[in-house]
Amino acid sequence: MSNTNPNSLLTRRIIIVLVSVAVGGTLYYLGTSALHAYFAKKFSPGAPPPAAVTAAKAELIAWQPEISAVGTLRAVRGVDIAPELAGAVREVRFASGQEVKAGEVLVELNIDADVAQQNALEAAADLAAITVKRDTVQFEAQAISQAQLDASQADLKNKRALAAAQRAVVAKKVLRAPFAGRVGIRTVNPGQYVNAGDKIVTLQAIDPILVDLTVPQQIAPQIAVGQALRLETDAFPDKPFTGKVTAIAPKVDPNTRNVQVEASVGNSARTLLPGMFARVYIGSGSSAEQVTVPQTAITYSAYGATAYVLDSSAADKPPVARQVFVTLGPTRGDQVAVKSGIKAGDMVVTSGQLKIKSGSAVKIDNSVTLKNDPHPTPQEH
């Protein structure tokens, strides 16, 4: 018969069970932790790759404040040549597009009948002059009265006036250039009948050429007569023209609150033509150095203007974008001046801002560069 105590046997069994549970739990915990670490490492997405952006360096450049406006070119002197009297065209003495001198004959109308009438009136005036001369001798001899002499003198004046009027009629049928310039396309031919006022050809003096523009009333005090300007036109996108302000209107248009300005531009090559559209840039104030960046680098929001500056201090790591608030100055073409927030030499993001935030790693890809032209031209050119 065994002397084993039942209580001690039960105790040993409980201890064995507890130890087994503890060991099993420990092994289970270690196994699941290792499995979780394995899968986490295997399928974790990791850090996002650097976002591709374009970037440009902020530059310190000389900045000449400018006033920009649009205008229309106008000839210094321009008229449409038209006859004062009707008649048939006898001769056309100009070619289309020809340069003519002041007083040069352009068109002659048929004046045969008018010249004949002029000759008749001049003959009558000559006869009246002879009569006055004879009556003067007779009056001195007291052969005629003062009244008869006065009548003869009045008749002479009348005949001479009629002859002068007829000479004016003949002269009006010979059309001359009132000033030197370039004629346009002729619209008449010999033998054609023209009425008074019918346009025959246009005459334009285009060197120099004028440009009419308007500026807002708040900008008008910055413009003065003699101020230098630069003119650009779509017809010659790569050729700027220079000129100066010649006149400023003494009143403001009450409808638009704009002031009309007239400027003169040299046009010795006759390339600029009246009626052309032009962009005018008038220098205002003195030149000063400004930190400039492309306008695409600036993001505008209700909280202010911001930009992303790139920090590339670590050579073995991609640049990191840092968002900064900026204070902006004037704009010029594709450029904007920055008064604070960016300093000269900083690399700023010029496109791709929507893909990043402050602290994002970026990759600079300038394979397609944005324009940074202070005087851009339309894309179609």
Image (cartoon, rainbow, N blue to C red):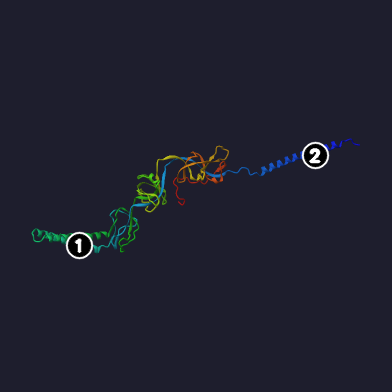
Q: Which residue is mark 2?
A: 17
**Res 147 seen here:** yes
Mark drawn on residue 90: none
**Residue that badge 1 annotates:** 121
In three-dimensional space, the C-alpha distance between marks 1 and 2, rounded to whole angstroms, equals 153 Å
Question: Identity of the amino acid at label 1?
Answer: Leu
Closest to the observer, 215 or 51: 215
Residue found at the far front of this picture:
254
**SS assignment at label 2:** helix
In this figure, what is the number of numbered marks? 2
Name the residue: 26% across, 59% down: 172
Residue 130 in view of the camera: no
Q: Who's the residue at 41% across and 44% down the image?
A: 66
Write down the quadrant of residue 80 in the picture.
Answer: bottom left
- Furthest toward the right, the residue is 1
Q: Secondary structure at mark 1?
A: helix
Is mark 1 in CB contact (under 8 Å) with mark 2? no
Disc 2 crowd rating (10 Å Cα; few below 14, some 14-19, many 20+) is few
